[in-house]
Amino acid sequence: MPASLSCPACGSEFEDRWRCTCGAPLRFADRPLPDGPAPDPHELERDRGLWAFEDFLPVGREVTLGEGWTPLVRADEWDASFKLEYVFPTGSFKDRGAATTLSRAVELGVDTVVEDSSGNAGAAIATYAARAGIDAEIYVPAAVKQSKLRAIERAGATPVRVEGSRQDVTDACLAAVEAGDGWYASHAWNPAFFAGTSTVAFEVAAQRGWEAPDAFVTPLGHGTLFLGAYRGFRALYEAGWIDELPRLLGAQATGYAPIADTLHGEADADPNEVADGIQIREPVQRGDILHAVEATDGDVVALSEAAVEAELDALHARGFYTEPTCAVAPAALHEFRARGVVDEGEDVVVALTGSGLKS
């Protein structure tokens, strides 16, 4: 029986919906937590991928391509460790959420999924839908990168190119959902997607012997990885598997930085058009993102186009072949240190989220 959903805003419960009737994002009604101490990390069944942590997951292992357990490597030039989230079947961290979202779609008996995306989430949903034998329609900007468009098409999904802004793409997709054209496999709304991205926290903690870092830095658009990491680390803390929560630090692009602007009032900067994967002006989980920042004594900053381009060159020169959006996170780490948010010598993990092969 698929897990039911509930609304944290009004308390309504549903067998399945893409959002509450009150308009708020939904969550799983029951959040599973393991009973007992953390296992020896070496005893985890890593061949089960994300479901090595199945005691935390509200979705069964129905669709998988062996995703998970991305490398955690030391990056001395940044005095940090990098979580290489670009080492995934479709080249981005979105595979975490796609695996759990399509697994829930199978549990529900879904025939067709629809998603809107700037590229990475669309490629992931299309690929995992193909794995599940489910049809997919992916709404993308008309100017989507050809590498991402090809990935969607070659997985057998139907791309729907939409002129206009990123919000126009979402609006067109939602019109299709409301018309009954498919089940909304949204990386911004679907709680199953966030269940998948929460596994990044489980892996980081396990790879570090159940010790959380002092801080965890991610790019921040809709907050898919940022919130997933928060919920994952909180679940580990509530289960007693880690002793404290890391500070959650988000990296946005100038001109598309609603959270950084709220925190710091820096809305006048020129738009950063390089970090195309996080060009989100109205994240649907805005309230939860701000709560995660406050609850972890975290912060969010916005990075300029020049800063991201320079950081991308530095990453490539040291063997980290990422796409431009990834570079906002290590660039943000420099800014957090300059502002005194992160002290020298603090233990920091930075997520690198998408492959340069898709640029």
Image (cartoon, grey):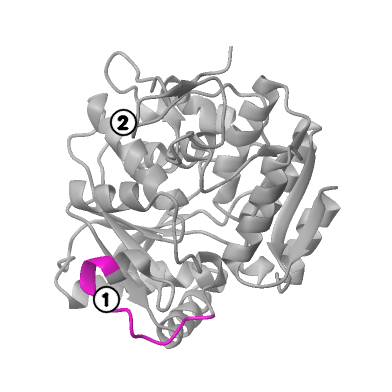
Q: Which residues are magenta?
A: 262-273
Q: Nearer the viewer, residue 154 or 322?
A: 154
Residue 119 seen in the current view: no
- Spot occupied by residue 274 in the image (x, y as percentages of width and height): 54, 79
How many circles with numbers are drawn on the protein? Answer: 2
**Location of residue 351 (image quadrant):** bottom left
Disc 1 packing (10 Å; few <14; some 14–19; many ≥20) = some
Question: Quick check: is 226 in the magenta stretch?
Answer: no
User: How far apart, in angstroms, are the residues tagged by discs 2 and 1?
Assistant: 29 Å
Where residue 208 is drawn, which disc sits there?
A: none
Query: Which residue is depicted at the point 83% across and 55% down?
Result: 153
Q: Which mark is residue 335?
A: 1
Residue drawn 22% across the image and 42% down it: 245
Residue 235's tag is 2
Q: SS at mark 1? A: helix
Image check: 135 left or right of 37?
A: right
The residue closer to the viewer here, 14 or 99, is 14
Taking 191 as reference, is 259 above or below it?
below
Q: Secondary structure at mark 2?
A: helix
Image spot of residue 357 (x, y percent)? 67, 67
> What residue lies at 30% left-to-right and 68% top-to-bottom?
260
Few, some or many residues within 10 Å of mark 2 (<14, 14–19, 20+): many
Amino acid found under the numbered disc labelled 1: Glu
Would residue 105 be seen by someone viewing this image from the given angle? yes
**Picture coordinates of residue 190, whole percent (x, y):** 53, 39
Q: In screen coordinates, is 52 left or right of 79?
A: right
Q: Position of residue 56 (x, y in %)?
A: 41, 25
At 26% across and 76% down in the image, what residue appears?
335
Q: Amino acid at mark 2?
A: Ala
Between 279 and 242, the one lying in front of the other is: 279
Is there a contact, CB below 8 Å, between mark 2 and mark 1?
no
